[in-house]
Amino acid sequence: MMKLPVIVVAVLLSAACPGIADEKEPAEGAAAGRLILGDASVWRAYITWMPAVARGTNGVVAPTRVYRGLKQSSAMPPQDWITPDFDDSSWFYWREPRVSRTLKINKTGARNPKPEDFEDTGLPAYDAGQYGIQRSVFMGLRCFRARFMVEDPGKVQDLTLYACFRGGLLAYLNGVEIGRASLPVEGAVPSDAAADDYPNEAEVAADGKKTLEQIPGDPENLKRINTRVRSLQAKIPGAALRKGVNVLALEIHRAPLKKVEWNACGLVTVELRGSGAILQAVTRPKGVQVWNANALTRITPYGGLAFGRIWAGGEVFLQSFPLSWGCPFAPLVPVRIAGARNGVFTGQIVVSSDEPIRSLEAKAGDLVQTDGGGRIPAAAVQLCFQGYPDAYPKSLTRDPNMSLFDVLYEKAPAEVSVRTGDNGGDGAPSRGTDFVAGWTDGGAVVPIWLRVRVPANVPAGAYQGKVSIRTAKSEETAVPVHLKVADWTLPVPKEFVTHVGAMHSPDTLAVYYNVPPWSDEHFKLMEKTFAYTSELGGKVAFIPLVVQATWLKNERSMVSWVKEDSPAGNSYKYDFQLFERYMDLIQKYLKPEVVCLYVTDGSGMCSIKGVTALDLPGGKAGILTLPPYEPKPESVAFWKPVIAEARERLAKRGLADTVTLGLLWEQNAGDKGKAAVELFKAAAPGLKLTQIAHYGGQKGENNGVPYGYVMSVWGNNTPQKSKVYGARDLSVKVAWHPRADAFNDIRPIAPWGAFRTVMERAAAGTIGLSPVGMDFWNLAKTGALEGAGAWNLGMASQTAGAFLAPGPDGPLSTVRFEMLRESLQECEARQVIEKALADPATREKLGEAVVKRCREVLDDREAWKSFCERGEGHAEGEGWQWFAGTNWEERGFKLFNCAGEIQKAVAAR
């Protein structure tokens, strides 16, 4: 049985919202002086995952059994990581600015208390993550590095480090130890060493029975859980400083588990204070700054705290922090991109300022092979400019700002305004809300994304170039770009093996851009969506033959019923003009393997109003009411001819084998669901069904009609079990629907790494991913369409309804779209490798050395997945932080090269 995550309940202000602290008061016990570094500074960080440990009865710390335990450790940091000249540019960013809180108690007991009703206890009240709640127990070692500038070491006074942490801490300055706490008092400390044990009071309530798995709201138990937060104060001698850039390094070791599973390895708060000839690194630097961030780093002026669903109904806090400026003392390093021929790959450069950014210009040059004659022209390097909504979204499902959260504009903005810093106020979300007010960094920021389309005919190898950036207030900055092209050529997206069931919303486009539905202007907008969908190799088309299908909220059906005179009474002919034009557009861009004629919503979900009629009584157009969804003669007679004609038209397009009927929800239970299936069994004999369900495809059929296409939350539940990667040996096309998944969470607020890897997860047991929405945007109130009403079953809050964003002239790409595309490209490479390794003849052709190398590459991918999953059991985000700092680009490069070796061997047969 799947273990549900801890539910964190906010009590008064104990779940502290982070905030922006430019110059806060010294922490209790800390030295006075200016704040040089703090948790609002920009740090580089590293995590090592290890098996959970506990102290045995013999006093020895050893691995212990926990739920979904980890059997191996991830890589330790390089030995020289504490030195000032160590290159930490591949490590992930850590910045968690917080507002100090204390526990306030409602002394009057009022139901709607006023500020004067509260009494301040003075007890520190940290948030859930700072107590190690909803954090992984497999975090064995955490490393942090931050830079600051010293102008004259002899003129620096009273430099003191004050750190709060969980576990044990070693602190270094410029590679020299300056203090330690809750670890052996002397001697070397191995990287996998455990910190001192915690007392029982850190996890057991005052009554001696209840365990502290949530934040307590009473002073006595808050004092007990506060013992999880340990501290170190270290006076730093002037001799440890050097002129120029100095590096503070913190090494945190985990403490052994006891009775409760909480994370005892983390940095809670940190302050470095001093005075004299030393520069602060706690606020955004003055002027324009150009800095590095790899493609998995979410750059944003916004942070937020949501209360969201994961797994099968568990609810957790989903927390994020602003990151909109870089360390002013870090070197500018090359943008590193790895890819393959005929693919599209991205990198990121960030421009930020304390003033408005005006007249931003960015220009890419050619990418030239360093050891050959290859050249990728500048025209193949498109620059996009990430934008943000004017305010942090208040809701995943309704706020239109959500649809602009990571939009990639194709033109540089004329001006990027300065946002006013805001800590979001007090409080925490309550259960059932999908967002609360966020908080905002001050200043201006615009990430510039490089989208490199690698030509199919360039030689493999290393390429170098640059992107030149300037603004009205800054000179030109040349940012080096390093691209590694693997020796493999991707197929065109239409020929991708991996399935992406991308849906789009014609009605959303018409409403958002205020164009007449199904006009030429409308089709031009739809064409833009389909052009993007084609780059994912979109495999599905939903054709509504009804009005107001639950998923689509469509105002007309793709076929219109036209009444004709007949002695038999109700007789119709059918207008397929819209159907044909829409199918022309689909086939221009897509090669669908599923065309679902949307005729029903099954039992209990139906919002269908009827079908479009062009000749109602009195000569009016409108909606024709449907006969009952029952196997009655009049119902069969109503549906049979139109479905037959639709099938015939699709057959002429070469799509006869793709046609299914839908949409069945869950198991389509009850008499109404059964009756609807019986109706279409008679009206469309031989057609299979399309279903979306938690346990999709059970029994392989529904009321005697086989499934043809299933979108399943829990993967393949058909009677057949796939024996190959990508599940193309199943008689039913089963795709994975990652609804509320904690690991590959693909909600808009999820880490980029989840999107960058989701396709390989999907192909491990199913044919791919479905459904995902392209343009189901949150709309302002417009009559029947409001919020994300066109995306049912809470999909905007549980999964992805819009991988595109609304641009001024039509749909635009998003960071999430780019990450999904790259995930798909890597999955295509894995499909090649898995297929080859499963075939004895191909393995023999490859030889033992290549087979071994391919297997090692796949094993490495399974290993990182295992580590990353252990950090995302509750959608914490720390698993993806780790992944972003582990040279993931090189992993993809090795995968592509293995696919290339196989491609050559197969071609040489």
Image: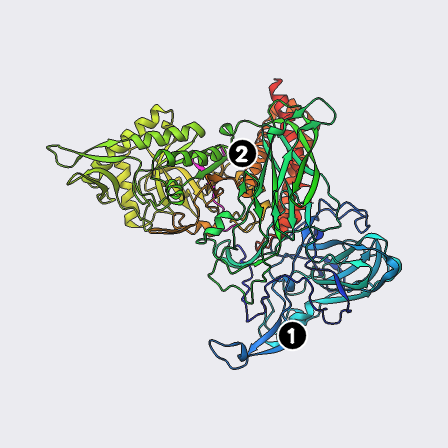
Q: Is residue 447 above or below residue 589?
A: below
Image check: 243 left or right of 900?
Answer: right
Residue where numbered disc 1 is placed: 123
Q: Is residue 441 above or below residue 735?
A: below
Determine the residue positioned at 24% across, 34% down: 640
Label 1: how many Cα within 10 Å (few below 14, some 14–19, many 20+): some
Mark 2: which secondary structure?
loop
Image check: 406 left or right of 203?
Answer: left
Which amino acid does the dot numbered 2 rest on? Val
Question: How many marks are shown on the rendered structure?
Answer: 2
Front of the two marks 2 and 1 = 1
Front residue of 761/540: it is 540
Residue 184 horizontal/vertical position (percent): 82, 63
- Is residue 622 in view? yes
Could you tell me which quadrant the C terminus lies in? top right
Residue 491 horizontal/vertical position (percent): 55, 27
Residue 839 horizontal/vertical position (percent): 58, 27
- Is residue 46 in view? no
In the rendered structure, which segment of residues is drawn in magenta? 725-741
| N-terminal label among 2 and 1 | 1
- Residue 767 falls within the magenta-colored stretch: no
Image check: 38 left or right of 708?
Answer: right
Label 2: how many Cα within 10 Å (few below 14, some 14–19, many 20+): some
Residue where numbered disc 2 is placed: 724
Query: Disc 2 and disc 1: Cα gap in Å?
Result: 57 Å
Furthest-left residue in this view = 567
